[in-house]
Image: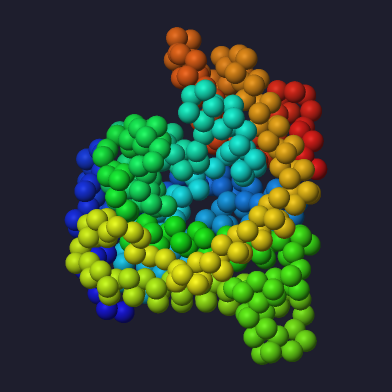
Amino acid sequence: MAGRAPFASNPEETRGRLFDEPESPTRSVFQRDADRILHSTAFRRLKDKTQVFLTSEGDHYRTRLTHTLEVSRIARSLARSLRLDEDLAEAVALAHDLGHPPFGHAGERALDRAAAAFGGFDHNLQSLRVVTLLERRYASFDGLNLTWETLEGLAKHNGPVTADEAMAREIAAAARRDLELGTYPSAEAQVAAIADDIAYDAHDIDDGLRAGLLSIEELAELPLVGPIIATVRRDHPGLERTRLIHETTRRMISAMIADVLAETEARLARRRPRHANDIRASLGPVVGFTERTAEWEREVKDHLRFRVYDHTSVRSVMGRAEEAVARLYGRYEEAPLLHLPAEWRPGLENASEEERAGRIVDFIAGMSDRYAVAEYFRMFDRPPELG
C-alpha cells in the first residue's frame, strides 16, 4: 500500500495529551491510545455487557466486547484501504461503546429516566467520561490521558455536536479541552462510525436468525440482503442453513465495505483535501455509503427494529432488565453512603443532589450484566426476574 494520505491524521502532528508525559519510543501516540483502551478495566467489562440478547440467553450471541472487536477490525480494514491512520481508527472503534451500561439500551433508558432532572444519560458522553475521569489506573492522572484526536473522534464520531447545547457543555467539561464540536471529526473517526453500522447490521441479522426472530425468506425481500442470499444459493446449491447464514453475512460485510470505499474515494476526489483539518472543515462527512446503499441500509435497520429489537420476547426481557436497573438506582439513591461500595463514597457527605446522582449513574453504568444481577441480589435478597 502507498504511504499515508495527505488528509490522514498524522501522529507526529498530534495536538497532544491533557497531561504531558514521555511518549513511547516504539509506538505512535495513536497506537498507544488503542493499547491503553484495550488494557482498561472498562474494556474488559464489555465481555459481560448485552449487545441485543442477554449473555445468559446463549453463548454465541454478540456481547459489547465481541461487537467492539468486530467494529475495530472493519475500521482498520477501511482505514488501510483509504491510507488513513489505522491505529487512530482502531482507538476510536475500541472506545466507542465503553460507556454502555448493563443490559444494553434497556439500562441506558433506565439511567436516562432516573437522571432526567440532571440532564439524563447518554452512552457516548459516558464513554468520554470513562476515558477522561473514571478509569483510575495511572499514578499521575485520572482517565487514560488519550490524545486530542482520539477524544475528538470519541466525542463526535457521529458528526458535529452543535444542536444540543447542554450536551456540548457536558462534553467540554468531561474532555477539559476544546474538541471543536462544531466541525466534523477526522476521517479515521468517520471510518469507525460507519464500521459500527456495518458490524451491527450484519451481526444483528446473524443473531436474529440464531434466535429464530428472523428467517432467510423474509431477508431475501430486502434489497441489500436478498441478492447476496441469491448468489450464495447459486454458488452453493443445497448449502446447510448455518453455512448459508455465515456466507451471507460475510458477503454482506464485504459488499458494504466496497460500497463505502467507492463512495468515499469519489467524495475525496471531488473535495481534494490536503490535510486532516480539511476533513474537519468539510460541510459534510467524507466517509459514507452511496445514496442507494444508504437507503437500503436504513431498510435493514428498520427491519431489525421491527422484527428483533421490538419483538415481544426481546421487549419483555429488556423491560424487566430496565426495571431492575431502575430499582438499583432507586435503592442507591435512598442511602448512597450505606449502599455504594466504600471507594465510591468519598465526598458524598457534603455533595449536592446532582453530584450524588452523577456518582450513582457512573457506578451503575460501569457494571457488567453479571455484576448488576449480583448487586440486585445484595440489595433485594433475590435475583431480578429477567428470563
* In the depicted structure, whether residue 124 falls above or below residue 339: below
The answer to which of 292 and 45 lies nearer the viewer is 292
Image point (74%, 49%), residue name? 314
The answer to which of 213 and 45 lies nearer the viewer is 213
* In the depicted structure, whether residue 260 falls above or below residue 359: below
* Residue 130 in the image, given as x and y percentages of width and height: 44, 38
Q: Quadrant of residue 137?
A: top left
Is residue 292 toward the left or the right of residue 33 in the image?
right
Image point (78%, 86%), residue name? 238
Is residue 50 toward the left or the right of residue 297 in the image?
right
| Quadrant of the image containing the N terminus | bottom left
| Quadrant of the image containing the C terminus | top right
Is residue 61 toward the left or the right of residue 98 in the image?
right
Image point (52%, 23%), residue name? 117
How many numbered circles are shown?
0
Residue 136 in view: no
